[in-house]
Amino acid sequence: MSELLVEADGPAWIFTLNRPDKRNALSASLVEALLDGVARADAAGAALLVFRGAGSNFSAGFDFTGFDAQSEGDLLLRFVRIELLLNAIEASPALTLALAHGRNFGAGVDLIGACRKRIASADASFRMPGLKFGLVLGTRRFGAIVGVAQARSILQEARTFNAAGALTIGFVEELRELHEWDQAVAVAGGVASSIDNASRASLFERLSHNDADADLAALVRSAARPGLRERIATYLGRA
């Protein structure tokens, strides 16, 4: 079965992360499928991109399966591809919507944060432990959403926050249960389609704080420090 389900429904392209047995962790192949899907949707002039997860949660983040058999160069490349995916979502001319439920970690939370509109179910929780193994990923985006002081506190402690907390700090805009998500997608599609593609793209570009090159440079510097694999092993051992 495909790791990514893609449905083009009117103005919306819906991407469903489909590795429920792995809590939708971001394997290298899933990241590549998402990169390809976002590029195809943008080329097709999609007005709305929706990201959701099959099973019990949205995404458990980076898939560490077999990491100890991969070289540090291989691991670095995988993190770079995730950063490029986040950049592509953030820079898309479409309205982007993340629908989050269950327990979400790391790069999965960063994927949510790259979207312009974020909705969570009441059971959702979020944790970004990347700094525990020295990785800087999604930091600027998170700070832009929740504020620098709030981001600093949450990230340096790798603190878990729940859906109510996410709503309070502005990481999500609404709490809606799963049976309400189709309605939320329909409303977002109507909003996205209310102006033409060129006008929407211009609006998003002028309001954007995107700094893709700096984000990528920060990620590469952090991941390229010697000992990445050992830092991950230490983190996973403690976790």
Image: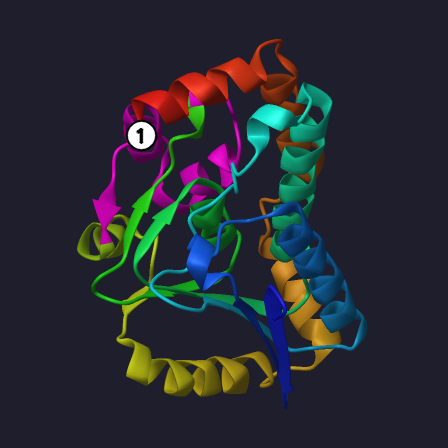
Estimate how packed mark 1 is, as few (under 14), some (14 to 19) or many (20 or more) residues with alpha carbons within 10 Å: some
Residue 181's spot in the image, x, y percent?
37, 80
Closest to the observer, 26 or 214: 26
Percent of width and height locating residue 199: 69, 73
Quadrant of the image occupied by residue 57: bottom left
Q: Main secondary structure of the magenta part?
A: helix
**Magenta extent:** 133-162
Residue 227 is situated, as x and y percent measured from the top left of the image, at 57, 10
- Judged left or right of residue 25, residue 181 is left
Q: Is residue 144 magenta?
A: yes
Depicted 236 relative to depicted 226: above or below:
below
Q: Residue 220 sits in which quadrant?
A: top right
In the depicted structure, whether residue 225 falls above or below residue 117: above
Q: Residue at x 48, y 16 (%)?
A: 231
Q: Position of residue 233 (x, y in %)?
A: 46, 20
Quadrant of the drawing holding the N terminus = bottom right
Under circle 1, the secondary element is: loop
174 and 65: which is toward the camera: 65
Q: Which residue has dot 1 on it? A: 158
Relative to 181, does residue 218 appear above or below in the rendering? Answer: above
Tell me, yes or no, if residue 46 can be seen here: yes
Residue 203 as seen in the image, left or right of residue 191: right
